[in-house]
Amino acid sequence: NIALTTISNVAMLMEKQNDNETATKLYEQVLTLLKKDSVQNSTVLETVLSNLCMNKLNQEKYQEALAYGKEAMEYTQKTSGKNSLGYIRAGNNCMVAHLKLKQFAEARKMAIEVESITKKILGDSAEMLVKIYSNLSSLEAQAGHLPLAIQYLHQSLVLQTANYEKNL
């Protein structure tokens, strides 16, 4: 488990250095190993699937990102339930992939689900809501709903400011 986590961390470092191809290869190798023993390594598997989703988003391979994101959501729902950070993270990633694919209805549906779960388990001032509202703002702007986009952007900024002031 420590070795797999280390390899996954090396993949993350490769991503930070913009070597997405090497990162993808490392993540996929870890994923293959984890799937052989997913019960013991459930947290690592969840993380690797989410990281692969982000990796594919960064490479603008949105269909692949969506596939990894959905797999992360399904796996997390099975192991931890919908009311978990892993599910929220995977759902937010899927929302972004849907947005990039211009699948606005699916993105909106995913965002609303993730927003509801986030508020339920983390509260109305959760940092994750800043990302969700920012993504919803982008979604509504691209869909041509500017007043709603501005509303979500405002919510994101107000929450971000409140969290910043709280942490001073």
Image (spheres, grey):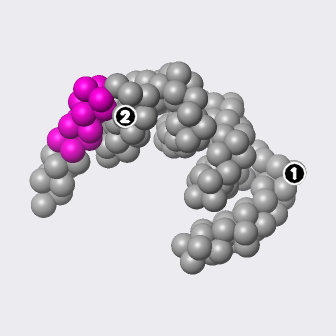
Q: Quadrant of residue 140?
A: top left
Q: Residue at x 72, y 46 (%)?
A: 64
Q: Position of residue 116 (x, y in %)?
A: 40, 24
* Pair 2/1: label in front: 2
**92 or 80: nearer the viewer:** 92
Residue density around tag 1, few if under 14, some if 14–19, many if 20 or more, within 10 Å: few
Please provide the residue range marked out in magenta: 146-158
Q: Position of residue 20 (x, y in %)?
A: 66, 68
Identify the element where label 1 is drawn: helix
- Apparent side of residue 4 relative to residue 120 in the rendered image (left or right): right
Ranked by sequence position, the earlier of labels 2 and 1 is: 1
Label 2 vs label 1: CA separation? 43 Å
Residue density around tag 2, few if under 14, some if 14–19, many if 20 or more, within 10 Å: some
Identify the element where label 2 is drawn: helix
Q: Position of residue 123 (x, y in %)?
A: 30, 33
* Amino acid beneath label 1: Lys
| Quadrant the N terminus occupies | bottom right
Q: Residue furthest front?
A: 144
**57 or 146: nearer the viewer:** 146
Q: Which residue is mark 1?
A: 36
* Amino acid beneath label 2: Ala
Q: Quadrant of residue 15?
A: bottom right
Q: Residue at x 63, y 59 (%)?
A: 59
- Apparent side of residue 130 relative to residue 159 in the rendered image (left or right): right
Magenta-span inclusion, residue 154:
yes
Q: Is residue 91 above or below residue 40?
A: above
Q: Which residue is mark 2?
A: 141
Q: Is residue 4 above or below residue 143?
A: below
Q: Residue at x 21, y 44 (%)?
A: 157
- Apparent side of residue 89 relative to residue 166 in the rendered image (left or right): right
